[in-house]
Image: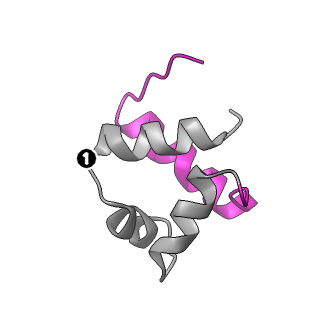
Amino acid sequence: MEWTPDRVKGLRKHLGLTQEQFAEKLGYQRRGTISDFEGGRHEPNPQAQIILTMLADQSDFQDEQ
Protein backbone atom coordinates (compact mmCIF):
# COMPACT_ATOMS: atom_id res chain seq x y z
CA MET A 1 0.00 0.00 0.00
CA GLU A 2 1.31 3.44 -0.89
CA TRP A 3 1.13 5.88 2.01
CA THR A 4 0.05 9.14 0.41
CA PRO A 5 -0.59 12.24 2.52
CA ASP A 6 -4.36 11.64 2.30
CA ARG A 7 -4.02 8.02 3.42
CA VAL A 8 -1.85 8.93 6.39
CA LYS A 9 -4.35 11.58 7.49
CA GLY A 10 -7.29 9.27 6.83
CA LEU A 11 -5.82 6.53 9.00
CA ARG A 12 -5.05 8.95 11.81
CA LYS A 13 -8.60 10.29 11.76
CA HIS A 14 -10.02 6.75 11.50
CA LEU A 15 -8.10 5.88 14.67
CA GLY A 16 -9.36 9.05 16.38
CA LEU A 17 -5.86 10.25 17.23
CA THR A 18 -4.30 13.69 17.34
CA GLN A 19 -1.12 14.26 15.36
CA GLU A 20 0.83 14.08 18.61
CA GLN A 21 -0.74 10.74 19.60
CA PHE A 22 -0.23 9.36 16.11
CA ALA A 23 3.43 10.43 16.15
CA GLU A 24 3.92 8.51 19.40
CA LYS A 25 2.34 5.37 17.91
CA LEU A 26 4.77 5.58 15.00
CA GLY A 27 7.75 6.13 17.29
CA TYR A 28 8.29 9.82 16.55
CA GLN A 29 8.83 12.41 19.25
CA ARG A 30 7.43 15.39 17.39
CA ARG A 31 3.98 16.08 16.03
CA GLY A 32 5.54 18.03 13.16
CA THR A 33 6.62 14.78 11.54
CA ILE A 34 2.98 13.75 11.08
CA SER A 35 2.14 17.21 9.80
CA ASP A 36 4.96 16.81 7.27
CA PHE A 37 3.58 13.41 6.17
CA GLU A 38 0.03 14.75 5.87
CA GLY A 39 1.22 17.85 4.03
CA GLY A 40 3.31 15.87 1.54
CA ARG A 41 6.58 17.48 2.66
CA HIS A 42 8.09 14.12 3.69
CA GLU A 43 7.23 10.48 3.11
CA PRO A 44 7.10 7.91 5.90
CA ASN A 45 10.31 5.91 6.10
CA PRO A 46 10.13 2.13 5.52
CA GLN A 47 9.75 1.35 9.24
CA ALA A 48 6.89 3.86 9.59
CA GLN A 49 5.23 2.41 6.49
CA ILE A 50 5.24 -1.04 8.09
CA ILE A 51 3.65 0.34 11.26
CA LEU A 52 1.07 2.31 9.24
CA THR A 53 0.14 -0.87 7.36
CA MET A 54 -0.16 -2.85 10.60
CA LEU A 55 -2.36 -0.16 12.19
CA ALA A 56 -4.53 -0.04 9.07
CA ASP A 57 -4.93 -3.83 9.03
CA GLN A 58 -5.72 -4.02 12.75
CA SER A 59 -8.34 -1.29 12.55
CA ASP A 60 -10.00 -2.39 9.26
CA PHE A 61 -9.09 0.96 7.71
CA GLN A 62 -10.68 1.42 4.31
CA ASP A 63 -9.85 4.48 2.27
CA GLU A 64 -11.37 5.73 -0.96
CA GLN A 65 -8.19 5.45 -3.03
Q: Is residue 6 above or below residue 41?
A: above
Q: Residue furthest bottom?
A: 29
Q: In the image, is residue 64 part of the stretch drawn in magenta?
A: yes
Mark 1: few/some/many CA within 10 Å (<14, 14-19, 20+): few
Q: Residue at x 69, y 51 (%)?
A: 40
Residue ranking furthest to the left? 16
The magenta-colored residue range is 41-65
Which residue: 65% across, 52% down?
49
Q: Quadrant of residue 18?
A: bottom left
Which residue corresponds to the image point at 62% horizontal and 43% vertical from the top-left? 5
Report the amino acid beneath label 1: Gly
Picture quadrant where residue 36 is located: bottom right
State the residue at coordinates (52%, 72%). Answer: 32
Q: Name the image quarter holding residue 46.
A: bottom right
> Disc 1 designates what residue?
16
Display colour scheme: one colour
Indicate the quadrant containing the C terminus: top left, top right, bottom left or bottom right: top right
Q: Secondary structure at mark 1?
A: loop
Estimate the x, y position of residue 61 in percent, counting from the top left: 41, 29
Q: Is residue 53 magenta?
A: yes
Percent of width and height locating residue 54: 50, 45
Residue 17, x across and y down, in percent: 29, 54
- Specify whether 31 is left or right of 5: left
Count of numbered tags: 1
Please state, as top left, top right, bottom left or bottom right, where the N terminus lies in the image: top right
